[in-house]
Image (cartoon, rainbow, N blue to C red):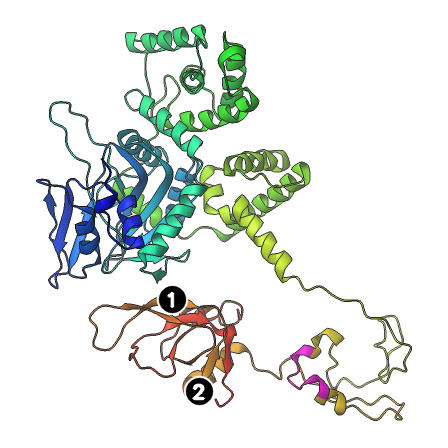
Amino acid sequence: MTIAVHLPQSEDGKRFCQFFDHRYSFIEANLNGEDRPEWKTISAYPIEHRNLWNRFQDPDTLIGLSFGSSAHYALIDIDRGSPYHPHNNEAAFKDLLGAYEDVGFNDHLIVQSSWSEGIHIYFPLPRSVPTHKLAVMMKLTAIRAGFVVKDGTLEIFPNAKPYNKDKPTPYKAHRLPLQVGSYLLDKDYQPYSDSIKTFLDQAERAAEAQDIELIETAIEAAHQAKAFRYIKGAGNKAAAFRRDLEEQIAEGWTDFGQTNDLLRIIGTYGRVFEGLEGKALADYIAERAKALPGYREFCRHQHHIERRAIEWARCIEKFYYPYGSDPIRFGTFAEMVDKGAKENKVNEERQMSAIDRIKRGVEFVKEKLSEIPKRVGEMKDALINAIVELFGVRPSDQTLSRYREFWHPDIIREVEIIILEETPQLEETPQEDTLDLEPEAPTSDAPQEDVSHNILQPEVLPEEEHSLCHTPQDVAQGNEPPSESLNPVLEERPSVYATPPLYMKVKAWASEQVSLIYQGNSVINTVELEGEKNPKIQSIEENQRVIITEDTHSSFLFHQDDEENLLVYVKPLNNDQFWLTGIPVLAKYLQLAPDG
């Protein structure tokens, strides 16, 4: 039976209901001006798609959905007071994202969930996977990376609920994105859109970027590891587990479609009973698989068996512990909070040293491989090997996750494209044999005139700094001394300090409330409006007339000499909507209006 006839009429509504498609055990709340909505679960009947779309658009209603037997996205909920929230501990937040990138989640969406400023991280998938297995993998990945999975701190959807055949329970429901108080956040965790179309477009792009094979590998590894992650002692349980693995490995392939199971079993044995990790574990998986019966006849992954072995090794290492060892302990919640506060004060010297090793490692990879690997996992492995070869130390996963902007293949390619597009092409002009009106600057070895140091001398600028002069080129040429004067005349040239620094201009513009023109790209943010209880999404467009507000951006206080990144708050010159606050823009894109 098709459900297409029940979908909303609008295209956005159809896409919304196809993405958020589980209609049973939903939650809803009426706002009624309350700060904390009172959610209630509706399990007596499923919500129809058209009703779901209408309630989602209703500003006085909140709606949330659960999960069915399969899922095509996962979500992490981090409260504003959590030690993992980026405003409390950005390093921990990046470590969390890095832990999931290690199992194949290469992209995500960050959403402010409500006015409370909590964060929802969405991980869309290109195809559906079993919900229960996805939930287990998401939880074990966080725990293995040292994070406390707990309501109010770090909550995962779908949740890893206990299985009860006789009394099945639904998965926990989560609030849907971009309702009242919810916005998409940019890389600086600033709101930029509340459009569900933008959310769905970005979710599609993120799903395409995921390494679904690695994700499914991690899902299966975590599912198998859930009930048996570590063993101690020489009891019957350990012996039975070892015997079961050895029996499954010895038989090898007997048919097609067995490769993933066998690689997982080999990897589990190598990790638990051989104590292997990293490259040694990957090599063990590949070499032992090749030697098994039926490999050449039935294994369809022979052309990339090494890559599959690396992926399985990476996942197994996250979910299994060597025989006789204890699982890693990460301390109490209070200790995690204290750790988060300390990590925000990272030693700058160690940080720069780590970044330098990563940068040099990337250059080593480029030189050795002639190009950057396209897959994140392959690039990460190549970089680790390069740093080990260059410096004799292995960077941790946390370090690589924290500084991914220096090595991630997608970011590196973007930077290279931007550099290629923005690098000016210098045209060679033929040199004419003309009489120079100005003498060449003497070299350091040439004899210097005896000029008293007590006399202030006019500053002579190098040729390339003429652009600092605001005089038009044709006017400047018209002011040159007559050609018949062959004796060099020391003319007054503008000093590099003749034009005041940008921050001084900004102060003058702000104090005088002069009319400016914004010449950058469109900027979107939330703005407080007169007469409105809640902030609204507004924008500053290219070539729009603006004035600087009285509010001072933090970059102006601490980095006012950094003209490339100096930010100021602006609002429209014709403030028809009565903005009470402004939108931060780069000051370098502001120019005086012709009549300013």
Report the amino acid beneath label 1: Ile
Q: Is residue 571 magenta?
A: no
Badge 1 is on which residue?
Answer: 524
| 21 to 197, vertically: above or below | above
Report the amino acid beneath label 2: Val
The foreground one among 15 and 474 is 15
What is the x, y in percent for residue 488? Answer: 85, 88
Q: Is residue 342 visible?
A: no
What is the x, y in percent for residue 125? Answer: 37, 39
Which secondary structure lies at badge 2? loop
Badge 2 is on which residue?
Answer: 514
Dot placed on the residue nearer the N-terminal end, 1 or 2 = 2
| 66 to 188, vertically: above or below | above
Question: Which residue appears at 82% of the width and 85% of the height?
Answer: 451
Distance from disc 1 to disc 2, alpha carbons, whole Å, reads: 22 Å
Q: Relative to 403, is 146 on the left or the right?
A: left
Which secondary structure lies at badge 1? strand
What's the magenta region?
Answer: 467-474
Q: Relative to 30, is 141 on the left or the right?
A: right
Question: Which residue appears at 53% of the width and 68% of the height?
Answer: 564
Residue 175 - label: none
Quadrant for residue 462, please give it: bottom right
| 529 to 29, vertically: above or below | below
Q: Quadrant of the N terminus?
A: top left
Question: How many other residues sit within 10 Å of disc 2, few (<14), some (14-19) or many (≥20)?
Answer: some
Question: Which residue appears at 25% of the width and 50% of the height?
Answer: 79
Quadrant for residue 127, please give it: top left
What is the x, y in percent for residue 545? Answer: 43, 81
What is the x, y in percent for residue 282? Answer: 51, 23
